[in-house]
C-alpha cells in the first residue's frame, strides 16, 4: 500500500517514538541489555524508513526482542487462556488471569531479575563474545531522550547504564555549535568538545578503563551521528589520542572478527582537477575541481605497487565496475552526497559526470573488499540542516551489503589538501600492518602532533584554506577540521 509522504512520515515518527518509549521503560526497570536490543531494532527501522527496502537485519534482529523465561511463560499462559475462552465461548477475565498464582509467581521472578539487572545470559554471552573478537573493545550505545541522555556500555566483562541529565534540546544545541566549530579551521572547538566529552564519555571512563578497553565501538543515535567522536576533548587531549574509534550501524549487524593481513590491492578513482557542470534532477549543478584528489591517487600509485588508478573522465562506470571485485580497497577521491530523507538523490560522482546512487550501490559486489574509502566532500551527510542521521546509517549499511567489511566517509566539506595528507597517513599506517580503524587513528594523531613516524613518514606537503598556513595547537593541520571529518563505519579490524 502506497501512503502519501506526510502519512509515511507520521508513521515513521510514531514507530521511532514507540521504540524510544520502550527502550526508556526498559532502562527505568534496569533491563539494560534488552534496551540495547531495542536500540538495534530502532536502527533497523530507521534504515527501513530511509527507503532501503532491502534491509534484512540478522537472525537475531528478525526474532525481535528476546524475552526472559518468566515473560515467555506469562505470554504462553495468556495465549492459552484466550484460545480456551474462544473454544468454550466465554469471556476472558483478564483481572483473574493476572492475579492467578502462576502469573503472580512469574511476575515476582521478573521483579527479582530486574532488581538484580539480570540479563538473558545467552544474549549477553553472544554480545560479549562478539566484543572479544575485536580484542579489548567496549560497545557504546547512547539513547537521546527528551529529558535526558542514557548511555549503555557493554564490555567483555560487564554491562552498565549511565543517566546524564541533559535534555534533547540542550544536547542538540551543543552538537550544532560543536559542528560549527569543527567545520571552521579558524574557530576554537575545545569548549564544546569538552562539554560533549563530559556528557558522552566521562560517565563511562572508569568502566572503560577497568575493562581495559582500547577500542570503542560506537552506535550513535540521532543528531550525535553528525559529529565525530574522535574530536571530543577530555581537557588534555582529543579522544582519538586515547582510543581507537569504530562507528557501527548496530551491534547485531556487525561482524567484529579480525581479518587476516593481506597485501593492499587498491582500485582508485580521482575526480577532475577542473570544475564540472552536470545536470542533477533537471537542474545544472557545478562541482568544484579537486586538484589534490589527483595528487592523492598519484601518491597511491607511487607508494603502493599494483594500485589500479583512473583519472578524470577515465574514472567512469565502464572502467571501474568490472574490476570492483578484484581489489581489497576501493578508494574514490571524488564528490559524494548523502541526503537526509532523500536516498534517490544521494550519490557518488564519477569523473565523467555520471553518478552512482545509493540504490546503485546495492548492485555492487565487493566480496574481497576490506575497505571502501570516499575521500572527498560530504560523503556521509549533506546540507546545512541536520536531520536524524539516517543517511549516515544508510550509507554504512549499503556498503556492508556489498560484502565490504568497512567504509570511510566524511561528515562535512573537507579540505582537499588536508585530506590528501590524512589519506597518505592512513595508507602508510596500513602498509606497516595496522588494522583499518587504528590506521585512521594514527593518521589523525599525525596531523594533530605533526609527528608522522607511526604512519611511515609524511608524504608531500600542501597549502590549506586559501593558501594560509594557520596554526592551531602548534601544527597547521592540528585543527579537527582537517583530521576529524572522516569516520570509519563497519568492521575496522
Image (spheres, rainbow, N blue to C red):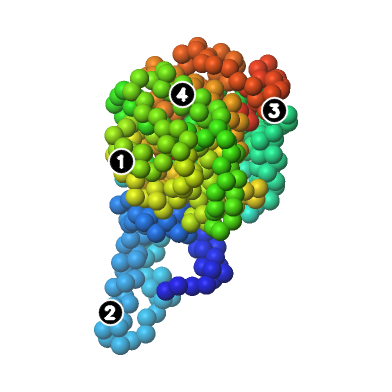
Q: Which residue shows up at 30% across the image and 83% down it?
A: 86
Between residues 80 and 461, which one lies in front from this camera angle?
461
- List x then y, in percent, for residue 321: 34, 42
Q: Which residue is mark 2?
A: 84
Q: Nearer the viewer, mark 2 or mark 3?
A: 3
Residue visible at 46% across and 47% down in the picture: 354
User: What label does residue 466 carry, if any?
Assistant: 3
- What is the x, y in percent for residue 412? 60, 39
Q: Sort mark 4 into few (<14), some (14-19) or many (20+) by Cα contacts within 10 Å.
A: some
Question: How far apart, in angstroms, are the residues tagged by discs 1 and 2?
Answer: 61 Å
Image: 155 above or below 74:
above
Quarter holding the C terminus is: top left
Residue found 48% across the figure and 35% down from its top: 312
User: Spatial distance from mark 4 to mark 2, Cα to Cα?
Assistant: 74 Å
Residue 298: image tag: 4
Which disc, if any, is residue 322?
1
Nearer-N-terminus badge (4/2): 2
User: Mark 3 and mark 2 in contact (Cβ < 8 Å)?
Assistant: no
Quadrant (top left, top right, bottom left, bottom right) of the N terminus: bottom left
x and y percentages locating residue 148 in the rendered image = 63, 49
Between discs 1 and 2, the one toward the N terminus? 2
Mark 3 in CB contact with mark 1 (< 8 angstroms): no
Q: Secondary structure at mark 1?
A: helix
Contact between labelled residues 2 and 4, with CB atoms less than 8 Å apart: no
Where disc 2 sits, the SS reads helix
Amino acid at each position: 500500500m502506497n501512503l502519501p509522504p506526510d502519512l509515511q512520515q507520521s508513521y515513521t515518527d510514531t514507530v521511532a517514538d514507540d521504540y524510544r518509549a520502550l527502550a526508556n521503560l526498559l532502562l527505568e526497570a534496569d533491563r539494560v541489555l534488552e534496551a540495547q536490543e531495542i536500540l538495534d531494532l530502532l536502527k533497523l527501522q530507521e534504515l527501513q524508513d530511509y527507503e532501503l527496502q532491502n534491509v534484512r537485519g540478522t537472525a537475531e534482529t528478525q526474532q525481535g526482542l528476546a524475552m526472559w523465561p518468566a515473560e515467555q511463560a506469562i505470554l504462553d499462559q495468556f495465549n492459552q487462556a484466550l484460545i480456551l475462552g474462544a473454544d468454550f465461548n466465554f469471556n476472558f477475565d483478564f483481572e483473574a488471569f493476572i492475579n492467578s498464582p502462576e502469573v503472580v509467581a512469574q511476575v515476582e521472578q521478573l521483579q527479582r531479575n530486574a532488581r538484580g539487572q539480570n540479563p538473558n545470559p545467552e544474549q549477553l554471552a553472544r554480545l560479549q563474545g562478539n566484543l572479544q573478537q575485536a580484542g579489548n573493545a567496549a560497545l557504546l550505545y547512547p539513547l537521546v531522550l527528551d529529558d535526558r541522555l542514557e548511555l549503555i556500555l557493554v564490555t567483555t566483562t560487564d554491562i552498565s547504564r549511565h543517566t546524564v541529565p541533559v535534555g534533547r534540546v540542550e544536547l542538540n544545541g551543543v552538537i550544532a555549535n560543536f559542528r560549527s566549530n569543527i567545520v571552521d579551521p579558524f574557530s576554537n572547538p575545545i569548549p564544546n568538545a569538552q562539554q560533549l566529552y563530559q556528557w558522552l564519555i566521562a560517565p563511562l571512563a572508569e568502566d572503560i578503563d577497568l575493562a581495559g578497553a582500547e577500542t570503542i565501538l560506537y552506535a550513535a543515535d540521532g543528531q550525535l551521528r553528525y559529529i565525530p567522536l574522535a574530536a571530543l576533548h577530555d581537557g588534555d587531549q582529543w579522544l582519538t589520542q586515547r582510543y581507537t574509534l569504530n562507528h557501527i550501524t548496530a551491534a547485531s549487524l556487525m561482524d567484529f572478527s579480525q581479518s587476516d593481513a593481506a597485501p593492499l590491492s587498491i582500485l582508485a578513482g580521482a575526480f577532475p582537477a577542473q570544475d564540472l557542470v552536470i545536470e542533477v534532477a533537471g537542474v545544472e549543478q557545478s562541482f568544484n575541481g579537486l586538484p589534490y584528489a589527483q595528487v592523492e591517487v598519484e601518491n597511491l600509485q607511487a607508494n603502493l605497487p599494483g594500485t589500479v588508478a583512473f583519472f578524470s573522465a577515465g574514472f567512469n562506470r565502464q572502467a571501474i565496475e568490472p574490476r570492483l571485485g578484484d581489489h581489497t580497497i576501493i578508494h574514490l577521491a571524488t564528490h559524494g552526497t548523502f541526503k537526509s530523507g532523500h536516498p534517490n538523490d544521494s550519490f557518488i560522482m564519477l569523473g565523467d559526470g555520471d553518478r552512482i546512487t545509493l540504490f546503485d550501490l546495492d548492485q555492487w559486489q565487493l566480496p574481497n573488499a576490506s575497505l571502501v574509502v570516499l575521500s572527498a566532500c560530504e560523503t556521509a551527510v549533506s546540507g546545512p540542516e541536520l536531520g536524524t542521521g539516517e543517511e549516515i546509517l544508510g550509507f554504512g549499511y549499503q556498503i556492508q551489503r556489498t560484502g565490504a567489511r568497512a567504509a570511510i566517509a566524511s561528515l562535512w566539506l573537507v579540505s582537499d589538501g588536508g585530506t590528501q595528507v590524512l589519506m597518505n597517513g592512513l595508507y602508510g599506517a596500513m602498509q606497516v600492518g595496522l588494522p583499518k580503524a587504528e590506521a585512521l587513528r594514527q593518521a589523525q594523531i599525525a596531523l594533530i602532533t605533526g609527528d608522522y613516524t607511526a604512519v611511515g613518514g609524511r608524504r608531500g606537503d600542501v597549502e590549506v584554506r586559501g593558501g594560509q598556513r594557520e596554526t592551531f595547537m602548534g601544527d597547521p593541520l592540528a585543527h579537527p577540521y582537517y583530521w576529524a571529518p572522516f569516520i570509519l563505519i563497519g568492521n575496522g579490524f
